[in-house]
Image (cartoon, grey):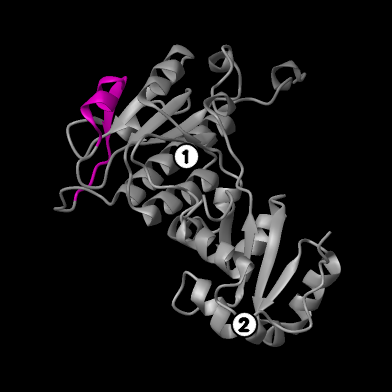
């Protein structure tokens, strides 16, 4: 069994097996990284641990281990994972950022299936009302990561990533999600999954730049799914055909459309606003029985 203590001397070779695995994980080569994903920076690693993600291994540059000696000592004591100490050059050769923080880790990313976000048959009649986001060939990883973060912020149940959508484990996606990727259920999906959700009572709404129902006029307190389309092409005709209605954000300014991540975030905010207002307006259980 490998010791969790770091070696007396740092790894200096760029071709070291551990360095190669880290490089493959950062570049997104899941075959060479043996299915592991890299997370860079102290913040993301702390978020992963807070979220219950098990670290496979930790990588530290010499400079980072000296600059953050207390944190380094804490990592060693915690035994969270084997620690590999790398020379600054070896670490830079694998890092995905121009100015790496000098700390990274490998994790086995959580996997979710459609059943994990499929509401129960009776969900429409319960107080738990699903709020889902479907991303239709959303290609920009920064937009994806931002929407994952907004989904967590506004209480979404999960995200359906339709074909052509960027990976939530892309390095840019991870940074944009600021740790939400460890907690939000992002499910690789197909168009038929929209049909399955609709059969469970979920209203499918396609977000369009203009011509749709004003989003404020739509009851998003009911089980709902919001489709956000590709940055350039919008929502595909096949996904559009599976929608219950089209919705639009009113924009009094003279712009053609909003950035996909901003539009999706505003729609999620409107859903959360409606749900909070409904919750506040609902009398507490037993309130009607209180004697006057």
Q: 10 Å neighbourhood of mark 2: few (<14), some, or many (≥20)? A: some
The residue lying toward the viewer, choosing from 138 and 202, is: 138
Q: Which residue is mark 1?
A: 273
In which quadrant of the rendered view does residue 15 lie? bottom right
Residue 197 located left or right of residue 185: left
Which residues lie in the magenta part?
Answer: 235-252
Q: Position of residue 5 (x, y in %)?
A: 82, 72
The residue lying toward the viewer, choosing from 97 and 178, is: 97
Ranked by sequence position, the earlier of labels 1 and 2 is 2
Q: Position of residue 118 (x, y in %)?
A: 54, 23
The residue lying toward the viewer, choosing from 197 and 3, is: 3
Question: Which residue is painted at 33% across and 53% down in the image?
Answer: 140
Mark whose residue sits in front, 1 or 2: 2
Task: Name the quarter where the C terminus is drawn.
Answer: top right
Disc 1 to disc 2, C-alpha distance: 53 Å
Q: Are marks 1 and 2 in contact (CB under 8 Å)?
A: no
In which quadrant of the rendered view does residue 276 lie? top right
Is residue 253 shown in magenta? no
Q: Which residue is mark 2?
A: 12
């Amino acid at each position: 069994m490998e010791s969790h203590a770091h070696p007396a001397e740092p790894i200096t070779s760029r071709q070291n097996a551990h360095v190669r695995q880290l490089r493959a994980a950062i570049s997104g080569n899941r075959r060479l990284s043996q299915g592991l994903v890299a997370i860079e920076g102290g913040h993301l690693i702390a978020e992963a641990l807070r979220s219950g993600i098990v670290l496979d291994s930790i990588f530290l540059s010499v400079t980072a281990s000296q600059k953050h000696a207390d944190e380094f000592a804490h990592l060693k004591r915690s035994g969270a994972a084997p620690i590999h100490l790398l020379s600054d050059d070896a670490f830079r050769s694998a890092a995905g950022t121009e100015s790496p923080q000098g700390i990274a880790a490998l994790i086995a990313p959580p996997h979710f299936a459609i059943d994990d976000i499929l509401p129960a048959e009776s969900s429409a009649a319960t107080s738990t009302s699903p709020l889902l986001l479907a991303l239709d060939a959303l290609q920009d990883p920064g937009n994806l990561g931002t929407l994952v973060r907004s989904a967590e912020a506004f209480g979404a149940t999960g995200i359906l990533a339709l074909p052509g959508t960027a990976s939530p484990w892309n390095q840019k996606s991870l940074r944009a999600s600021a740790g939400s990727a460890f907690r939000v259920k992002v499910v690789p999906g197909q168009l038929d999954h929209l049909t399955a959700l609709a059969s469970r009572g979920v209203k499918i709404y396609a977000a369009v730049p203009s011509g749709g129902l004003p989003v404020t006029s739509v009851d998003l307190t009911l089980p709902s799914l919001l489709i956000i389309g590709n940055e350039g092409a919008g929502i595909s005709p096949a996904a559009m055909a599976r929608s219950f209605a089209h919705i639009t954000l009113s924009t009094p300014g003279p712009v053609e459309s909003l950035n996909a991540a901003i539009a999706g975030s505003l729609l999620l905010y409107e859903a959360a606003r409606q749900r909070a207002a409904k919750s506040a307006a609902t009398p507490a259980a037993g309130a009607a029985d209180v004697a006057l």
